Amino acid sequence: MFWVGLCGLGVVMLLTLVTEVRTRDSLKKANQAALKSNAFADESVRNRETVLGLKMQFSIAKSWLLARKDSLLLQAFASDRGVVFSSAAKFFRMLMQSSMLCFGSYLVIQQEMTAGGMIAASIILGRALQPVEQLVNTWKQFQGARSAIMRVDRLLASLPLAERKTKLPVLEGRLSVERTVFSTARDALPILKGVSFDLLPGECLSVIGPSGAGKTTLLRLLVGANKPLGGIIRLDQSDLATWDSEQL
């Protein structure tokens, strides 16, 4: 009976391997399609003012529905394959338990085994095959988790290493902007050109201008979110880029 159980365990392990081979590509495509549709939706929400201004909401919704449809179809296809192999693993486990009972009954009739031993062998076989069957049932979640970990690893590997910056003295608060120039691209017209001012600690400066004049862009430069293409921004006579963001 040991060899019967061992063969059954081997077959269930084989089903697990087949599940990996047959569902890997489908799950990968389904996850990629889901990420694509979610990214499209997020981008549309971030640019909702432009979308509404250009009256593109219906075309955007149609494009998202098509992307979502592809994602759901791929997920359904992958799930169907997973259900087939999961059902096959469960069927084979029940078949092996029934076969164990039949073989055990034969041994009991031949007085080579007791009835209690037959039942115990059937229970042990079921317990031995159940974890492998559960692995087949949860293979989709395992694949999704592995794919997510790989994406996180690739993202972390693509990030530049943070430069160690020298810790500067305690901040006093003098802000100097010298002939600062900023543009979204080097060949585009500058949003800010030749901006200069000097503020001592405790002084205030009001920036007034029409929409699109560059007020928000100037603030982003002052907090270090953007870097100027020309000129320099100093904080306590030190280039703003040399300050540690955590120290600020």
Image: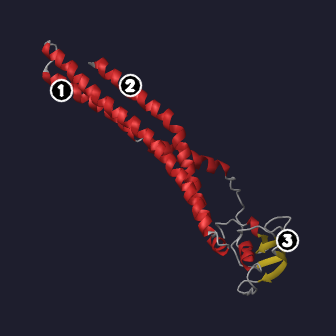
- Mark 2 lies on residue: 11
Please state the horizontal and vertical placement of residue 155, each as a whole percent of the image. Answer: 62, 50
Badge 3 density bin: few <14, some 14–19, many ≥20, Cα 10 Å? few
**Going by the image, does 169 lie left or right of 231?**
left
Which of pointers 3 and 1 lies earlier in the amino acid sequence? Answer: 1
Mark 1: which amino acid?
Ile
Q: Are marks 2 and 1 in contact (CB under 8 Å)?
A: no
Please state the horizontal and vertical placement of residue 7, each as a whole percent of the image. Answer: 35, 21
Q: Secondary structure at mark 1?
A: helix
Q: Secondary structure at mark 3?
A: loop
Does 166 appear above or below 237?
above
- Mark 1 lies on residue: 119
Q: Which mark is residue 189?
A: 3
**85 or 56, which lies in front?**
56
Does 139 appear above or below 5?
below
CA–CA distance between discs 2 and 3?
A: 68 Å
Q: Nearer the viewer, mark 2 or mark 1?
A: 2
Mark 3: which amino acid?
Leu
Which of pointers 2 and 1 lies earlier in the amino acid sequence? Answer: 2
Q: How is the image coloured?
A: secondary structure
Q: Are marks 3 and 1 in contact (CB under 8 Å)?
A: no
Q: Secondary structure at mark 2?
A: helix
**154 or 171, which lies in front?**
154
**175 or 9, which lies in front?**
9
